[in-house]
Amino acid sequence: MDMKTTTLVPRLRQWWRQEIRPLLILVVVLCSIRSSLADWNDVPSGSMNPTIIEGDRIYVNKLAYDLKVPFTTWHLATWSNPQRGDIVVFYSPHDGTRLVKRVVGLPGDTVELRNDELIINGAPVHYSSLNADVSDQLPDVEQQQSQFAQEQLPTHPHAVMAIPALPAKRTFGPIRVPEGQYFMMGDNRDNSFDSRYFGTVARKEIVGKATDVVFSINKSDYWLPRSHRFLQPLDAKD
């Protein structure tokens, strides 16, 4: 072994111990936190308009319902379950894509949709007018093409919208939600790929509860920030 090799090996070991290994440990710890405790989710589509707008980055509380083994859907402990009206992040049973939707039907519920109006367990959900401050955050063209309302889910009223010009599944069911499953829908009812199309979602596939907009950028306006949406709750009750 020559002198250069003899000198290089200790330097590489020192570099590994002092630089690379601590950095790798930090990366693993941070990724584990994101996987099991808290995360954020970028929203590229308008399926949750007007509650969540394209370009929003939302906070996901992964401890809202349970604790999972990092990087898996295995539950270590469960202390709660999603409630009707919660906005949740889950893996789609269609293709495994991570989606953001609202819980509409709980295990054992009967869910029905008639002309874009929900009927849960045989009782029609009440609708009222929506505060214009909510719909005004959408582009003018989208506002002109859409209809807005406040859907009065018990204990959890929230905004919904419809786009009459689009072909959509406005009438659906009735369907009974199986045990251990949840029925998901987007707030943008005529432009959402949800449980009407891919079926109910297993409890184990729910990642966590989305509660707030962390920050938001307007991709159609030179990626400028929407500062008025920073750190805002997704629903008034949250």
Image (cartoon, grey):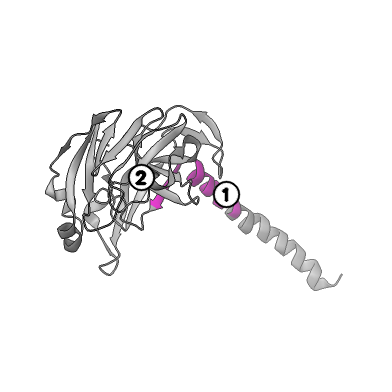
Q: Where is the N terminus found, in terms of image quarters?
A: bottom right
Indicate yes or no whether the magenta region holds residue 34: yes
| Camera-side residue of 74 and 106 | 106
* Region of the chain picked out in magenta, as a range: 24-41
Seen at 25% across and 68% down, the residue is: 221
In-image side of 96 versus 57 (left or right): right
Judge by depth and name the residue closer to the eye, 44 or 124.
124
Q: Amino acid at mark 2?
A: Lys
Quadrant containing the C terminus in the rendered view: top left
Tell me residue 231's x, y (percent). Answer: 28, 48
What is the distance, in whole Å, between disc 1 and disc 2 at their CAs?
Answer: 29 Å
For label 2, the residue is 101
| Dot 1 or dot 2, earlier in sequence | 1
Which structural element holds mark 2?
Answer: strand
Prevalent SS, magenta region: helix
Q: Which residue is mark 1?
A: 28
